[in-house]
């Protein structure tokens, strides 16, 4: 009976091992598994994306577009379908997690430091490492014994907190005092913080880049380093790791604020992106420390990964894709198009107090004036941070016969999009000039029955902060809010 129970338990653990083979962060991955599973999943992903793109746009996703490592260039393919772009990103993230997990374990299987598996997060370099990991042989020839260890490691990686010491090749667990735990956590938090702050300073003030390496690769690597250091002497569960990574990010952001890297508003907006990525990295780093992937000290591999980040920043200028995004906001006004037109070309000062998000520092519109009449005239829309200079390109006032009107303009000069919260007077992060750029806009007046008018305000903008899809999720609602404040004011004045 006991033998049957034991065999059943072993079978269940084997099934669990194979079901979690793609996504678990423990155990080794052989060359055969890496090639077959990796390229098999890539083919499935390509066929799904190809089918979706053909249905939505009629365009073909070429294999070159598919292997393009730059996230911005791929999302640009479905720019006209924001919902599809978000869906594509959510669909891609699990595949990225699988690729990182399998690369970390394949590197360990080949006798390399598992840390080199994180090179999957560096564009262009990841293609080279995939090719290398696909041909390197397994260092441990006893495949059956390695597989048995892998099955046991699936459960051991998420064991409850326990003290451990490494004695030769064996792991001896013992209880330790609380100060040692605090010391491990402090060092882990400090290490992750140093990585994020140093890479941030180099990227922002050295290269003037807000890109993939800063907002995607760096938090994962910083989290992995914190998770690995935290679990070198103590094995903590995911709950402890969850809190550690949160504290590491909060401390990192506080240091960034104190050294003038950026202001509080942008750091707050970045937190929902950076924290989940760094937690995923923390899980990978924890696995490197507490499972059999750690066959020897991994400090050299850890430092090599850290040095890879500044070098990867040199690749950021290659991802220079920028695309226009359109935002439309409309309001129905109980007034004729002629009455509305007079308020559109120049409206008086907005007396209503701004919404809470404008009071936090987002630039809010105040009033508009115009110099001249017709095409070639120049409109000045004053914001709390300065004026938008808007030369008129289309001037079509409503006609007496009841037709609508159109006022269109370019934007040749714009103020800062926000006033950052910072302890430094006059701090001017590069993203205030280059991150969000309004290119052009228009007001469309459509007559409605009952002497009413539908007024549609439109802005075309682009952003140079990546991943663009994430920051677009902040920028588009902000533009809508600005539109709404202006259109509601025009509605009140016209009525």
Image: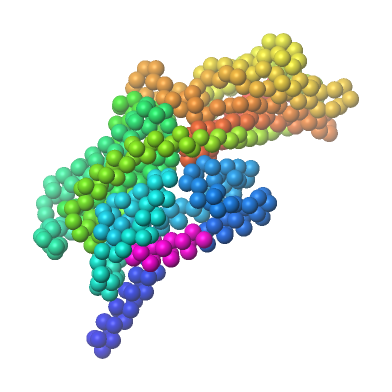
Residue 173 versus residue 450: which sits nearer the camera? 173
> Viewed as shown, does residue 398 lie left or right of 40?
right
Residue shown at the point (65%, 22%) measured from the top left: 410
The reply to whether residue 377 is visible in this rendering is yes
Residue found at x 68% / y 22% = 409
Q: How far across and how far down the image is residue 227, in percent? A: 27, 50
- Locate the N terminus and report the quarter of the image it occupies: bottom left
Q: Give the camera-side residue of 93 and 2.
A: 93
Q: Is residue 79 left or right of residue 494?
A: left
User: Could one spot residue 90 in this view of the protein?
Assistant: no
Q: Is residue 3 above or below residue 35?
A: below
Please say if 425 is above or below 264: above
Which span of residues is magenta-colored?
22-43
In the rendered image, which quarter contains the C terminus? top right
Q: Is residue 373 left or right of residue 476?
A: right
Q: Position of residue 221 (x, y in %)?
A: 32, 45
Task: Please give left or right for residue 277 compared with residue 6 in the image.
Answer: right
Q: Nearer the viewer, residue 433 or 322?
A: 322
């Amino acid at each position: 009976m006991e033998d049957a129970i034991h065999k059943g338990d072993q079978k269940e653990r084997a099934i669990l091992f194979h079901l979690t083979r793609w996504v678990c962060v423990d155990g080794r991955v052989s060359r055969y598994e890496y090639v077959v599973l990796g390229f098999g999943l890539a083919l499935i992903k390509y066929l799904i994306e190809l089918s979706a793109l053909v249905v939505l746009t009629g365009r073909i996703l070429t294999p070159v577009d598919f292997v393009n490592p730059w996230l911005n260039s791929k999302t640009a393919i479905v720019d006209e379908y924001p919902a599809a772009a978000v869906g594509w990103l959510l669909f891609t993230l699990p595949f990225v997690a699988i690729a990182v997990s399998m690369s970390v374990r394949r590197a360990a299987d080949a006798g390399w430091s598992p840390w080199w598996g994180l090179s999957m997060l560096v564009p262009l370099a990841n293609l080279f490492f995939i090719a290398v990991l696909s041909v390197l042989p397994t260092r441990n020839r006893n495949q059956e014994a390695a597989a048995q260890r892998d099955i046991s490691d699936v459960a051991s990686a998420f064991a409850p907190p326990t003290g451990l010491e490494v004695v030769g090749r064996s792991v001896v667990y013992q209880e330790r005092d609380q100060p040692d735990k605090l010391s491990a956590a402090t060092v882990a938090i400090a290490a992750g913080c140093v990585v994020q702050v140093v890479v941030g300073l180099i990227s922002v003030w050295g290269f003037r880049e807000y890109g993939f390496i800063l907002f995607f690769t760096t938090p994962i690597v910083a989290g992995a380093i914190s998770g690995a250091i935290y679990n070198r002497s103590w094995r903590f569960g995911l709950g402890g790791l969850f809190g550690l990574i949160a504290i590491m990010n909060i401390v990192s952001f506080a240091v960034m604020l104190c050294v003038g890297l950026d202001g509080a508003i942008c750091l707050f907006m970045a937190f929902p992106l950076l924290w989940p990525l760094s937690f995923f990295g923390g899980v990978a780093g924890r696995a490197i420390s507490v499972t059999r992937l750690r066959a020897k000290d991994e400090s050299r591999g850890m430092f090599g990964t850290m040095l890879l980040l500044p070098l990867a920043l040199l690749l950021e200028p290659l991802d220079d894709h920028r695309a226009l995004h359109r935002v439309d906001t409309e309001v129905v006004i109980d007034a004729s198009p002629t009455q509305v037109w007079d308020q559109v070309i120049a409206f008086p000062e907005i007396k209503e107090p701004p919404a809470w998000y404008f009071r936090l520092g987002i630039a809010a519109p105040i009033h508009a004036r115009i110099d001249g009449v017709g095409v070639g005239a120049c409109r000045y829309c004053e914001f709390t941070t300065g004026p938008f200079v808007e030369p008129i390109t289309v001037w079509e006032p409503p006609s007496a016969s009841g037709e609508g009107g159109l006022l269109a303009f370019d934007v040749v000069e714009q103020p800062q999009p926000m006033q950052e919260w910072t302890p430094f007077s006059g701090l001017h992060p590069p993203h205030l000039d280059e991150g969000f750029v309004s290119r052009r806009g228009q007001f469309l007046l459509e007559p409605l029955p009952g002497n009413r008018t539908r007024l549609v305000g439109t802005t075309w903008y682009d952003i140079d902060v990546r991943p663009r899809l994430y920051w677009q999720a902040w920028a588009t609602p902000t533009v809508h809010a600005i539109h709404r404040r202006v259109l509601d004011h025009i509605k009140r004045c016209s009525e």
